[in-house]
Amino acid sequence: MNVDFLDPTDPGWATALEDLPHDVYHLPGFSQAFAATESGRHVLVVAREGSQIALIPLLFKPSVMPDHFEATTPYGYPAPLVRGDATFAAVAARSMVDGLRQQGVVSMFARMHPLLDSGRELTRNVGTVVEHGPTVWIDLSRTEAELWSDTRSGHRNPINRSVRAGHQVFFDAEWRHLGDFVRLYEQTMRRVGTSSYYLFPSSHYDELRRRLGDHLHLACVRIGESIAAAALFFETDGLVQYHLSGTDYASLRHSPMKLLLHHVRQVMRGRGNRRMHLGGGVGGG
């Protein structure tokens, strides 16, 4: 069985994803966008046999052993993906492990995807799976009435109050408020005491826009003359990912993020997406 190691600039990376359900984290542009914040060698490991295929994006980092590497999936949920039967998955898993060993990889850590489970066929044959906790997602195939009915009253009430108060929620297609988003995101991260790992340089957002194009969206809530909340979302192959967000401290009492998520849910459903993933709490995701 052939096992290839593709660079993000190799057109074969995008070709390998064709007709294979995937998320933004599997795109070559995603690995390129995070190259500056996650140093190492970004590769797509691909095993093929006829029309069957297995793949996983990885980041090779130097090991304490000279000329050896530790492999991990990049930021997010770039889980292994498989299109093939159980026999193929078993052989592919062993072949990929052998290929990684030949590349000098001594260990590998992979994050699974909460909504795409085809890669679990690979984990049946190699490695250990650890469950960290649940994540939250929205079924966008449901009607708007059903989604609203499923929304807890603790969310519906602030949304209704925001609508009555005239708070404006919109997608910023021209990215005029990217600076507001960065300010609010960093303010929020510092308020909750997050790790500095999640404080990205401003150039990172430019790279995301350049590499991901229409897969990336900025949504905002305006209260009066100020942006009260803003968030980044990914949209790929019917899946919407809630990426990063921030809320102005002075606007917390208005719960503007509830209005923002409600609006994004409506718009993304209308665009034909299937699921919207909100992530997990502590220990989940």
Image (spheres, grey):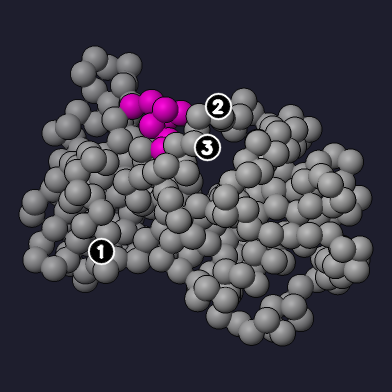
| Residue 242 counted in the magenta span | no
Name which residue type carries label 3.
Tyr
Position above or below: 236 against 85? above
- The CA distance from mark 2 to mark 3 is 8 Å
Which residue corresponds to the image point at 72% horizontal and 84% vertical from the top-left? 145
Magenta residues, start to end: 33-40
Position above or below: 160 against 244? below
Residue 19 is situated, as x and y percent measured from the top left of the image, at: 27, 69
Compare residues 219 and 175 and report the one nearer the observer: 175
For label 2, the residue is 201
As drawn, the label of residue 113 is none
* Element type at mark 3: helix
Quadrant housing residue 123: bottom left
| Residue 39 counted in the magenta span | yes
Name which residue type carries label 2.
Pro
For this view, does 250 lie left or right of residue 97? right
For label 3, the residue is 205
Which residue corresponds to the image point at 65% horizontal and 36% vertical from the top-left? 179
Q: Which of marks 1 and 2 is nearer the N terminus?
A: 1
- The CA distance from mark 1 to mark 2 is 32 Å
* Element type at mark 1: loop
Which residue corresponds to the image point at 8% horizontal and 51% vertical from the top-left? 2
As drawn, the label of residue 18 is 1
Residue 251 is situated, as x and y percent measured from the top left of the image, at: 87, 46
Residue 113 is situated, as x and y percent measured from the top left of the image, at: 45, 56
Name which residue type carries label 1.
Glu
* Element type at mark 2: loop
- The CA distance from mark 1 to mark 3 is 26 Å
Question: From where the camera sits, is residue 276 visible?
Answer: yes
| Labelled pair 1, 3 in contact (Cβ < 8 Å) | no
Position above or below: 79 against 259? above
- Residue count near mark 1 (Cα–Cα under 10 Å), binned few <14, some 14–19, many ≥20: few
